[in-house]
Image (tube, grey):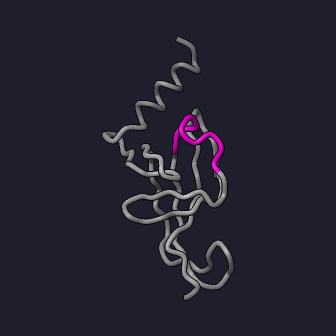
Amino acid sequence: MTLKDNIAADVLMVMNEDEGAEQITYNGTAMLAIPEIGADNVKGNTFTREGSSADAAFWVLVANVPKPIGGDKIMHNGIKWTVARVASNAGGLQKIAVTGKESVYK
């Protein structure tokens, strides 16, 4: 078994519901992800420095989402999140930064 094979096996071991992965839908496609829900009601949103939003990140398999695009949608626990950017890549996983609960009000 090569190092690449070992990394791929480790990623699959972590990406299951017994290890903290949760169901999401990414642009309508169901998959598992590891959520990192961040701050709620932070100042600013995707469009302006006014208003408020929540921030989070989701670790997904690169094989499931090879090329995330800003504006893609993730649904998790009834909350719609909007993809902002890819925050990092690591061994077959990528961390996708998202915003949600956007409001023009503070």
Horizontal side of residue 32 vs 92, given as left or right: left
Q: State the residue in front, 24 or 106.
A: 24
Q: Residue at x 64, y 85 (%)?
A: 50
**Which one is nearer the viewer's eye here, 3 or 100?**
100
Residue projecting furthest to the front: 28
Residue lying at the far bottom in this picture: please name it: 105
Up/down of 53 relative to 106, above or below:
above
Residue name at image x 40 percent, y 31 percent:
13
Measured as percent of width and height from the top left, residue 32 is found at 42, 43
Q: Magenta-highlighted stretch: main secondary structure?
A: loop
In reply to whether residue 62 is colored magenta, the answer given is: yes
Q: Position of residue 77 (x, y in %)?
A: 37, 60
Question: Which residue is located at x 42 percent, y 51 percent?
Answer: 24
Which residue extends farthest right? 48
Residue 36 in magenta stretch: no
Quadrant location of the C terminus in the rendered image: bottom right
Q: Is residue 77 left or right of residue 62?
A: left
Q: Residue furthest left?
A: 18
- The magenta segment: 60-68
Residue 54 x/y as whole percent: 51, 71
Q: In the rendered view, would you say 91 is above or below 84? A: above
Q: In the figure, residue 55 lies in which quadrant?
A: bottom right
Going 52% across and 11% down the picture, which residue do you hit?
1
Q: Foreground: 23 or 11? A: 23
Count of marks placed on residues: 0
